[in-house]
Image (spheres, grey):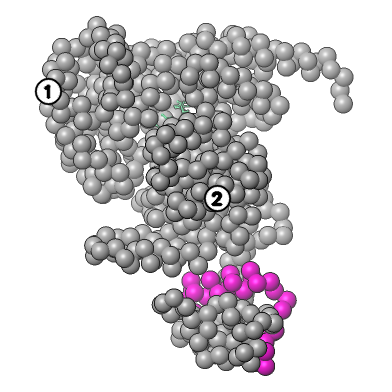
Amino acid sequence: MSDARLYDTLRKVFGFRAFRPNQEQVVRAILASQDVFAVMPTGGGKSLCYQLPAVLLPGTCIVISPLIALMKDQVDGARANGIRAAFLNSSLLSDDREAVMRDLLSNSLDLLYVAPERFTLDHFREILGRVKISMAVIDEAHCISEWGHDFRPDYLSLSALVKLFPGLPVAAFTATATHRVQQDILDKLALRNPLVVRASFDRPNLGYDVRFKDNPEAQLVSLLKSNPGKAGIIYRTSRKSVSDTAAMLQAKGFRALPYHAGLSDADRKSNQEAFIRDEADVIVATIAFGMGIDKSNIRFVIHADLPKSIENYYQETGRAGRDGEPAQCTLLFAQSDIPKVRFYIDSMPDDTERARALGALTKVIAFAGNSVCRRRTLLDYFGESYPHSNCNSCDICLGTREVVDCTREAQMLLSAMVRTEERFGAMHIVDIVMGSDNKKIRDFGHDRLKTFGVGKEHEKKYWRQLIDDLLAQKVIEKSEGLYPTLFLLPKAVQLLKGEERIEIVRIQEKKKAKAPLLKSDVSSSPYNQELFDLLRTLRKQIADEGGIPPYVVFSDRTLHDMAAQYPRTAETMLTVSGVGEVKLERYGRQFLRLIDRFCSDRLHSPSP
Ligand code: ADP
Ligand code: ZN
């Protein structure tokens, strides 16, 4: 394959000037008929790795994909670029199914997406035998592994795939990263001398921060206010907290919708659709949400409760910023969330499961509680070492936290615990040091203690957080049971004697934090927000008319580029990232007209 033809297709069909890391290598291997196994993070650009060869090679590329919703999205996306794509699954009406079959049999499809169970049907295999196939692709290949998080039994039938396509390349893709899952996939698929690509799992356009969760409602409202009109996901653990949070946000005027397994299929579907179509900005969801989502313009993901594992956290936050534009991932964390999760884990009947869940939880707590770069910690989990000392885009590296010596304050709390014989819980101990006047304090005569009111200068939140820190640093421990009391560990005694000091990491709330330096993969220049908003409205209109999601028309990245470069001609429009020939022909005129009008309005309007 000549370089010219490869790059020409990349430009004309997809509207891209350059490959992203690893794409070219994968494309070339497939074109040379080699099997491929590629682990690439979400947003890494996996689809292009097979869609480009599918356009170049004669015959139909069969893509096995686990989710019906994803198939439709992928097909819409491919078609928007003028690729002849279709899908076959149980959601199709029989007329539509027959039309797809006709296209397949007349060799007029570049891409056919199918669900895995179709491969167990003799009838389907027989049909495949009658058409020219170019290659086979297994998307979300980790579904074949029991070690992964979305194991799908029907994926096991895909181990027979290489035998079904002798002489044709088979390419498997996944964004799931652990080495154990990788090996399992390789074993099960039995690829023939494959090119194995393991991309970096770093998502440079994502920023990470962890905040002390003290008032989640107010914190969520303030986070949404600082992201007006932007698309985001808020993850919560329980159905009830999802419903409550969504209702609270709606009452405050946000375009938020709930998503959890307790809703009817119809409600779930319509809420998801509203989010995909930019009609709702925020989706509040349990982890049931996300697998079938290809929406590329998600600008923030907030975890208002603890994620189950680092792997889950990475997958869930990974849904942000697929288009390569900056996006923010925030975790609200309080030690007091841990007992709930512990309770759930402790009730697991299976010993191995329980041990695994506990191990995963411990790692999440370490991630949230320590003061190491978040990005480094995440990458470390996937066995990748981050090469820089400062990522410039997490709360730790941006220095929005500081280490403070809290020995004196810790001594106040410990002393209050000693003087009350370690028989009380956190709330009461805080009341003592703060000198609160309430019945329980008076009944026990705790207003006469020497430590009563010694810590008036700090707020309740400060003391609660300090107790969290003391628990995390194993200075004190909490008893089991319904009314847990605090008791001292050996380190506490040394602290009280002044033989040990305690340092904790605090978020600097007063000082304005440095703005994160988020790197998109092409340095995105400043753009005109007003024009961007107009372009977005036009995109939404066009999407609605065509019955496709807005990001399928153009990504946020593409609109940003337009709002920075002000293309006024078809030629300059083609230099915008994401504008290929088909999209130029379909949508170019409308966008050019809008930009033209915008520019001349500004030229003629008197300057303010
Ligand atoms: P994945 O499936 O790996 O999560 P996608 O295939 O959905 O990623 O691609 C993510 C985004 O990146 C899409 O918006 C896509 O258009 C864009 N993209 C892919 N390849 C390139 C490229 N070479 N240059 C610019 N953008 C790209
Ligand atoms: Zn960092």
Say which quadrant the C terminus sits in. Answer: top right
Q: Quadrant of ligand 1?
A: top left
Residue 377, compared with residue 548, is above or below; it is below
Residue behind mark 1? 122
Q: Give the residue drawn at x 31%, y 65%.
A: 347
**Front-most of 509 and 193?**
509
Q: Tell me which corner region of the image, top left, top right, bottom left or bottom right, holds residue 123.
A: top left
Amino acid at pointer 1: Asp
Residue behind mark 2? 245
Q: Residues within 10 Å of mark 1 (few under 14, many from 20)?
A: few
Disc 2, SS:
helix
Percent coordinates x, y for residue 572 in the rendering:
60, 13
Percent coordinates x, y for residue 24 in the rendering:
37, 26
Which comes before the other along the chain, label 1 or label 2?
1
| Residue 450, magenta (yes or no) | yes
Percent coordinates x, y for residue 423 in the rendering:
50, 87
Amino acid at pointer 2: Thr
Q: Give the residue drawn at x 48%, y 71%.
A: 472
Disc 1, SS:
helix
Q: Which stretch is magenta? A: 447-475
Q: Give the residue drawn at x 60%, y 49%.
A: 248
| Residue 415, magenta (yes or no) | no
Q: Is mark 1 within 8 Å of ligand 1?
A: no
Percent coordinates x, y for residue 100 in the rendering:
29, 13
Residue 66, compared with residue 493, is above or below; it is above
On screen, residue 87 versus residue 527, left or right, reads left
